[in-house]
Image (tube, rainbow, N blue to C red):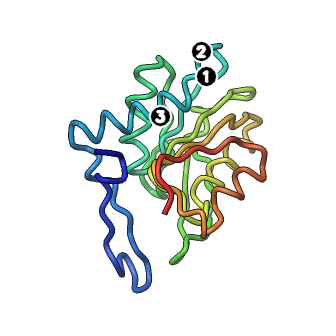
Amino acid sequence: MEIKDYIRSFEDFPVKGVSFKDTAGLCSSHGFQLANKFISQKLLKYTSESYTNKIIGIDARGFIFASPFAYNSSIPLVLARKKGKLPGELISKTYDLEYGNSTIQIQKDNIETKDHVIIIDDLCATGGTILATIDIVESLNAKVIAALCIIDLPELGGSNKIKDKGIPFYSAVDY
């Protein structure tokens, strides 16, 4: 089986007209192994020269895929969370989704000037969440060196917006 075989689609969720791509099936033993192997193959080159010093996992399913990579590469994991989920001094960015808007936050002291960061999430649609996270990182004078999602919806343009910023973007499955 391949990564795509573990992804299910739910029509009209969370709103009518949206085909929700559900990565929960990748949490099975074999699916999780496939996803983590893909992530390691794509991102290992950024860690082999000690170039990366932070991994950001985006709330909530990005945590699932970012955590093992951060652990296996011995790089600290930073959480980018939805508004109201983190204590302390926060940096926030509000962004548009394909069906509304949201706010992402990172604890200010988790990213330092000159950090080199990889961002991992489960899905890229319009790119709003990742682009907002990039904006936060850059506002702290750090640099995003790569972004990865398990799923890309290229017709919605998010991955191209990330690439247009000069940031390498990787995805395992395109719909």
Where disc 3 sits, the SS reads helix
Percent of width and height locating residue 157: 65, 65
Q: Which disc, if any, is residue 147?
A: none
CB-based contact (under 8 Å), mark 2 and mark 1:
yes
Percent of width and height locating residue 48: 59, 15
The residue lying at 69 percent from left, 37 percent from top is 144
* Left or right, residue 23 beside residue 165: left
Give the alpha-carbon distance from disc 2 to disc 1, as whole Å: 5 Å
Percent of width and height locating residue 61: 38, 50
User: Which residue is identified by label 3?
Assistant: 39
Nearest the viewer among 118 and 149 is 149
- Among all residues in the image, which is located at the extreme top? 49
Q: Residues within 10 Å of mark 2 (few under 14, many from 20)?
A: few
Percent of width and height locating residue 43: 56, 29
Amino acid type indicated by mark 1: Lys
Q: Which quarter of the figure has residue 159?
A: bottom right
* Left or right, residue 58 beside residue 112: left
